[in-house]
Image (cartoon, helix red, strand yellow):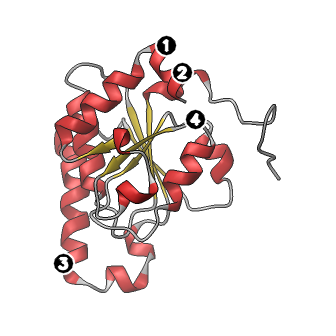
Amino acid sequence: QMAFGPGTDPEPEPAAAGDLGCHGRAGKAPHLAVEILQELHKTDKRYKLFIKGRRPEEVDWLWKRPEEQEYYNRFYASIQSYGSQDHVVEEAQGSDVPEWFRHIGFVISPSEFESFHMAIAEGMASRAIPIIRNWKGSEALFPTRYSFSNVQEAVALILKYTAEDQFVAEG
């Protein structure tokens, strides 16, 4: 069990500022997180994207849908064609979420819609900076200063907070 509170907050690992995280995949629009990564790579190749959760073919209801299979086949092909395979790390679903978030500097929510995005709250509790697609209702749950409408806005937010003093102060 990991305790939270004054003096017990997990310290992010030193490389965390350049590490982007997506927790979950189904219905989460992971292609958008990859597009953000690819745009960031135009200025700095050190960024990595960690995707935690079950692979789409491991989710029966999802993989039975031909349009989802097509989406994820295009998703993986885009990673290969851009040459991002060394910068996108897939990690299995598990109970190690608090430990996983220790090396995540930015938790990205590329979802088009959510009821409540638990991964954002978990990421913020671990001091990751949230980058939230402005899905309907997100403004009622999370500070709008972390919201984005397009890839360029998400990249601008990440670059703004990547600066050493901003990253430490915000996280």
**Do callouts 2 and 1 mark residues in contact (Cβ within 8 Å)?**
yes
Q: Quadrant of residue 93?
A: bottom right
Q: Which residue is mark 2?
A: 169
Label 2 or label 3, whichever lies nearer to me, is: 2
Q: Residue at x 19, y 50 (%)?
A: 78
The type of residue carrying mark 4 is His
Q: Is residue 169 above or below residue 12?
A: above
Residue 83 visible? The answer is no
Q: Which residue is mark 1?
A: 165
Element type where label 3 sits in the image = helix
C-alpha separation, residue under disc 2 versus residue under disc 3: 42 Å
The residue wearing badge 4 is 103
**Quadrant of the image containing the C terminus:** top right
Report the residue marked by disc 3. Answer: 67
Give the mark nearest the N terminus, 4 or 1.
Answer: 4
The kind of residue tagged 1 is Asp
Q: Which disc number belongs to residue 72?
A: none
As helix, strand or loop, the secondary structure at mark 2 comes to helix
Task: Of the two numbered discs 3 and 4 on the same chain, state the one appearing first in sequence.
Answer: 3
Label 3 vs label 4: CA separation? 33 Å
